[in-house]
């Protein structure tokens, strides 16, 4: 009987031990399950300012760099990431804080010109925190990617036109020209010329001395390869003086002089700043003419001023002598809109002006 009690007591102890081991084993599995679940998924708190990439884009950026938010995570890897991006006056600032089973890291901070730059930098740091294999590799310092800064375009440099020769034989209108790298030269070739000659046809059988002060400006563009072109219209401005001219009959003498001005638009088939220049212009102008008539005894019988309006076509050819002086020739025709006349004391007509006048002149001037 004593032996039997001892056997019963041993059996009870063994049964109690098995039950205890089973209980603690189940409890350990229960405790381990949340940790395992936590280790299989990394929590991400992402807060990006408006216009920044989304949380999905940030995860994709991290995973493209070797970091994973799901799957088995070994010891030391982050279990949670907190990311924040805010905009500042000089760009964007991003912060990152990682939490692992051991501790919470200090806040890491990056700066960039754009939000994408900050996201790329934080993605690199996050991938390092999530990828435990990165700890066994040589440590590489990753600097935040900063968007390239576009260098400020230097201010254009102006220079005296006399420093270089330009020869243009082509005018550009809405054109595209492939050019090589280098400097593009924009010039404005100006010429101020004094012409002197004669005008005929305005007053019958009378040649009137004529003097023109003419200004033209030619816009030139020169490519890095050295080819020059005329771009845009060539404006012109001239002031003219006609006189003193005299128209005589048997009983009268009429003195004439006129002042006119004209604005024009020109075209040039060739413009060489150190050689030949050819310019054709169409002009429209106005002015007035003084008509003073005296009889045979020299008594004034008429003194009046008449208005003039006209259109003009002319061709100029010039030769630039060096970098400053030029000589020229101008031929043209005026088509008068208005007419004028001279009368005797009794009202009879002495002459009537023509609607057409031609002129030819030689010139001397400067170009710059």
Image (cartoon, rainbow, N blue to C red):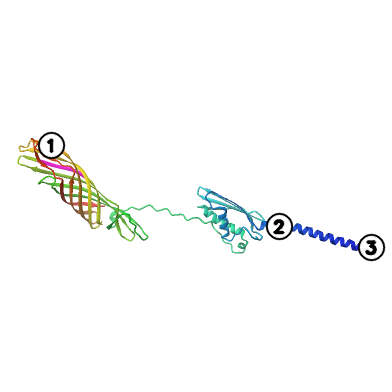
Residue 141 lies left or right of residue 322; in this view the side is: right
Number of marks: 3
Secondary structure found at label 3: helix
Residue 110 against residue 140 in the figure, above or below: above
Secondary structure found at label 2: helix
Q: Which residue is mark 2?
A: 33
Find the distance from the CA under tag 2 to the CA under tag 3.
47 Å
- Dot 3: within a 10 Å radius of its alpha carbon, few (fewer than 14), some, or many (20 or more) residues? few
The percent coordinates of residue 170 (x first, y second) are 28, 57
The percent coordinates of residue 13 (x first, y second) are 86, 60
The percent coordinates of residue 207 (x first, y second) are 11, 47
The secondary structure that most of the magenta stretch takes on is: strand
- Dot 1: within a 10 Å radius of its alpha carbon, few (fewer than 14), some, or many (20 or more) residues? few
Circles 1 and 3: CB atoms closer than 8 Å: no
The percent coordinates of residue 134 (x first, y second) are 60, 62
Q: Which residue is mark 3?
A: 2
Instruction: Verify whether residue 177 appears in magenta.
Output: no
Q: Which residues are magenta?
A: 254-261
Q: Nearer the viewer, residue 209 or 176?
A: 176
Dot 2 or dot 3: first in sequence order is 3
Q: Which residue is mark 1?
A: 303
């Amino acid at each position: 009987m004593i032996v039997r009690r001892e056997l019963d007591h041993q059996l009870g102890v063994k049964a109690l031990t098995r039950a205890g081991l089973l209980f603690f084993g189940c409890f350990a599995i229960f405790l381990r399950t949340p940790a395992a679940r936590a280790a299989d998924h990394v929590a991400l708190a992402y807060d990006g300012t408006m216009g920044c990439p989304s949380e999905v884009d940030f995860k994709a950026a991290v995973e493209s760099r070797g970091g994973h938010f799901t799957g088995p995570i070994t010891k030391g890897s982050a279990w949670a990431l907190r990311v924040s991006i805010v905009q500042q006056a000089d760009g964007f600032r991003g912060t990152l804080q990682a939490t692992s089973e051991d501790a919470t890291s200090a806040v890491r901070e990056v700066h960039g010109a754009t939000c994408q730059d900050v996201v790329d930098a934080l993605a690199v740091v996050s991938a390092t925190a999530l990828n435990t294999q990165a700890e066994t590799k040589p440590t590489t310092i990753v600097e935040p990617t900063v968007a390239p800064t576009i260098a400020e375009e230097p201010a254009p440099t102006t220079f005296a036109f006399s420093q270089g020769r330009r020869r243009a034989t082509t005018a550009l209108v809405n054109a595209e020209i492939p050019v090589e790298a280098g400097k593009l030269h924009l010039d404005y070739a100006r010429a101020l010329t004094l012409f002197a000659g004669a005008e005929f046809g305005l007053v019958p059988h009378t040649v009137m001395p004529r003097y023109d002060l003419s200004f033209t400006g030619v816009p030139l563009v020169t490519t890095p390869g050295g080819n020059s072109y005329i771009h845009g219209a060539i404006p012109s401005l001239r002031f003219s003086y006609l006189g003193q001219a005299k128209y005589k009959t048997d009983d009268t003498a009429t003195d004439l002089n006129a002042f006119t001005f004209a604005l024009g638009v020109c075209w040039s088939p060739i413009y060489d700043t150190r050689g030949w220049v050819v310019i054709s212009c169409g002009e429209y102008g106005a002015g007035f003419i003084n008509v003073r008539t005296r009889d045979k005894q020299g008594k004034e019988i008429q003194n009046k001023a008449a208005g003039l309006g006209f259109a003009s076509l002319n061709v100029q050819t010039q030769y630039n002598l060096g970098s400053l002086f030029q000589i020229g020739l101008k031929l043209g025709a005026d088509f008068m809109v208005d007419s004028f006349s001279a009368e005797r004391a009794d009202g009879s007509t002495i002459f009537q002006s023509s609607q057409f006048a031609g002129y030819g002149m030689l010139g001397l001037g400067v170009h710059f």
